[in-house]
Amino acid sequence: MLTQTRILRASWSSTLRLPKSSFPPRPLPATNADYLRRCTDDLYAWQQSPERSRLTESFTLHDGPPYANGPLHIGHALNKITKDLICRFQLGQGKKVSYIPGWDCHGLPIEIKALQAQKKDAAQAGPVSVREAARELATRTIEEQKQGFKEWAVMGDWDNAYKTMERGFEIRQLEVFKSMFEKGLIYRQFKPVYWSPSSRTALAEAELEYDEGHKSLAAFVRYPAHMSEGLQHGALKDVQGEISVVIWTTTPWTLPANKAIAVHRDMQYCVVRDLDRDNELTLVAASRVADYEKVLERKLEVVVTDVRGSNLAGQLKYENPFQKANGLQPVIHADFVTDSSGTGLVHLAPGHGMDDYNVCMALNVPAFAPVDDAGAFTKDAFPEQPALLEGLPVADIKKTGSNAVCKYLEKLNMLRGKQNYCHKYPIDWRTKEPVITRATEQWFANVEGIKEASMKAIADVRFMPETGRSRLESFIQGRSQWCISRQRAWGVPIPALYKVEGDKLEATMDSEVIQHVIEVIKERGINAWWTDAQDDPAWKPEHLTGTYIRGRDTMDVWFDSGTSWTLLPQQKGQPVADVYLEGTDQHRGWFQSSLLTHVATQPYATQTVKAPYKTLITHGFTLDSDGRKMSKSLGNVISPSQIMSGELLPPIKRKKQKGNKGAKTDPIVNTTVLTYDAMGPDALRLWAASSDYTRDVTIGQPVLISVNQALHKYRVTFKWLLGIFSLPSCPPTFKSFNHLTTSASDPHDFYELTDRLAVHRLVQVSAEVHAYFGKYEFYKGVNTVNKYIANDLSAFYFETLKDRVYTGDKADCETLQRVLGLVFYELSQMLAPICPLLVEEVWDHVPNALRDGSIHPARATWTPLRARTDTESSALSSLSSAVNQLGSAIKVSQERLRADKKIGSSLETAVTLYLSEASASDLLSDFSAFMHRSASPSAHSPEAMQTQLAALFVVSELNIHTLAILPEACSDHKAEDLEQRKQRWAWWDEEVVALGKEKARVVVHKPSQEKCPRCWRFVRDEQAELCQRCEEVVREEGGNVVV
């Protein structure tokens, strides 16, 4: 009589080899700080140490400085962690990595926040107090942000992090400025710039955003015109009486600054009569008459047709009612005039538009901008009646300035129509308020002079994604100047002195002035520019005579950060950095300013110069799970700390304690406190690494749940592997993980089919992940790793190993330890850049002897495992295909049997394969070719193949029978054999699959032998106590207990 399984399991369990490890299911807070230090500060210091000085290859990722003006957000995490992934991968390639973090400390955002903290505005606070408050805010924010970055396991030279407010950085920046000045690239001019009334400073294009739905007040305005005699007797000879021109503008507030009206010489114009306006005669573009009629809501009579713009330019004059003292103003030609909107006549205010400025300057028409720093009219807007406009804002939401102008024009019978016009309009990227174009005295960098050299410099740059190339090129091509001066206190001063000439100040700048200013700053510090007395003679170089004061303009912050490349060692004929990586908005910001300043300081006129970067990578923005931008008003902001703490995941369910049904609940214990699955920095890092950063990245609970599940899968996998390396009765025979791949023996040289398949798959995954990481496509590499662990290891290889680990002989256990050693170390190296704390923790639990004899996976050079020979690969491909087809069919049948309550474990089944003779021969041939290194010829036999396939499919028995033809036209004898077998089996299930060009029958049925109480395989003879293998193992162990 058979003994019950439960009793047998109890009596033989002591002879089993059960893996155990102290590796915890989740990170322990007590050890986190130590692991964090090891994998960041210690690792970075080690890789920069003298012992690695023999390395000839280095790698530099130059950090684009974040603003030091607020707490860290999820966008910071995507940025900094992606940079760290790149650096760690390059370290693993045996390179000495340089990553010096930095901070952008100057600029309006920090100044505004500092003033808000003081509850003051710029008008109330002097420059010295503003600078003190801003420096204090930036210093405090840097420390807070640095702590956050380090908690994310971002390694770098934190002790030498650069700050744009440091004296050394500012000196280098001024030296770049001096170099550009000496090449004629810096100049001062009164010309239109983007001006932010809300910030009271000039802005560069990189500091603009655009409101796609901005509403402007548009106006049609009539100006009575004076014709020249030539026009009166020429194209308009048939016109009797006064004639007017009508312009259309979306900025009526610029009309007081009007200096000319433009037509296009090739455009056709006509004269129309308005019967409702006392037969008023007006000039408009012929193609715009119908639209003008819609504005007037009445029909017009065309009096004269086919008047060319060339007939009008220079032949008409008119009066600006706000500037009568200027006399009559001209109608001129401008290339940019079109008939796509308006009237075909364009009002020109050279003080409020760059196109207007360029056209008017060519004709010596001066720029005029009667608007102050706050964006309000000055008294010069209407000298005759200053009270009418002075002080009125021109860019407010009520359109106060434009309405006042229109009201006065209507009073003069010059307004012909008003409308609300929705269009794209620039806004200040910080205050989100409208900007205006306003002519002021500003300092500029001549981009036109280095545009061609800059385009050539990026020709050899690698862009990721490639679309970044055209984006950066378009910003360079579309720019001719760079306004580099700002009217703020918190920044690096533009080194200009101003000569006092009565009530006027005349800017003075030359190389000696700049160098002298640099030397004084070196001695006194940059704050002295503001704190020293204005007449302090120390700031005036000897070659100047007269009274001079220091300027108050500071440099654009993009000039600050754009010169950060100066802290890197110069590489002869090479870019200073291997990689620049920032958000996609930096094509018009840091990427561009770095390129322009770098090119400008090189001999671009005589040589093809290099960009500061070899590879330029851009990442997208972070969005919530619904694809929306994160904002406090929407309540969808996600903090990086929330991901690390796990609080965005469902809370952990408390497990009921066994045997306490009658126990009373402890009133002290608060059962309402929720506990979350905190996986620490690795959770945040795995999210970043799993994201396709070249696009906008979404984040929400579904994404974070999958990240959490992957992390737990990693930990479970490592825990099982560590347990196998820690078996007291079977310690690994190898002393170092590194010897498994570097020793003379072939890592593919294993006798078991499952081991060979596992190593081959590991080789494939190693190559794939290495290639993806090498292209910085980390999300593809992580996806490959996750599939490998879930499908190839957990669902396949580890399942086949359990019997061998728990119940197999020692020699087999030692063999599979070698295979698992390869898997463990390769997996550790793959995950070292992604989850450095996990790898550090795992390494801490490796048996001491094995750990001491091996190189830390984060410090070893990672190269893909050696691939198989072509012959083996070909045989494996064919064999793998057959195995996959047969395995799938077996599982389908097993599931049906399991549903019918016939089986539980797959070991309770046997499999009989019915193949054609050709298929059976091919299968054996592929098996033999694949196993050709095995010493024993018997290892290539059909019997050996059946045994190996049984272990592979985790069934107790597998037999192969051949049939001449399958399945319909079987011979009577063979068919009868199959049917007779089915009748003898207590239960069975069958699947037919395609095996190459042939079909095969897969029959899953009850095993022919009895269950072994030790290994649970159905391979025991009825009279025996154990199966033959278990008897030999127990005998080998001398009957001793195995642990």
Image (cartoon, rainbow, N blue to C red):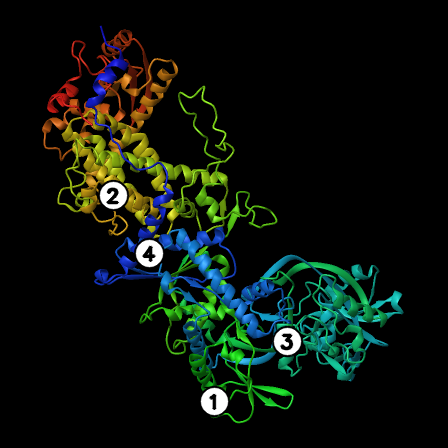
The answer to whether 97 appears left or right of 327 in the picture is left
In whole angstroms, how far apart are the C-alphas of marks 4 and 1?
47 Å
Q: Quadrant of the C terminus?
A: top left
Q: Are marks 2 and 4 in contact (CB under 8 Å)?
A: no
Q: Which residue is mark 2?
A: 825
Q: Nearer the viewer, mark 2 or mark 4?
A: 4
Q: Secondary structure at mark 4?
A: helix
Residue 498: x, y in percent? 56, 85
Q: Is residue 964 visible?
A: no
Residue 756: x, y in percent? 21, 34
In whole angstroms, how far apart are the C-alphas of marks 2 and 4?
23 Å
Q: Which residue is mark 4?
A: 41
Q: Which residue is mark 1?
A: 541
In-front residue for pair 859/659: 659
Q: Secondary structure at mark 1?
A: loop
In whole angstroms, how far apart are the C-alphas of marks 2 and 3?
65 Å
Give the mark nearer the N terminus: 1 vs 3. Answer: 3
Q: Nearer the viewer, mark 2 or mark 1?
A: 1
Give the mark nearer the N terminus: 4 vs 1. Answer: 4
Answer above or below: position of 389 versus 649.
below
Q: Nearer the viewer, mark 4 or mark 1?
A: 4
In whole angstroms, how far apart are the C-alphas of marks 1 and 3?
31 Å
Residue at horizontal 30 percent and vertical 29 percent from the top: 884
Residue at horizontal 39 percent and vertical 64 percent from the top: 161
In whole angstroms, how far apart are the C-alphas of marks 4 and 3?
51 Å
Q: Amino acid at mark 3?
A: Ala
Q: Secondary structure at mark 3?
A: strand
Q: Quadrant of the N terminus?
A: top left
In-front residue for pair 835/34: 34
In whole angstroms, how far apart are the C-alphas of marks 2 and 1?
66 Å
On residue 18, which mark appears? none
Answer above or below: position of 236 versus 816.
below
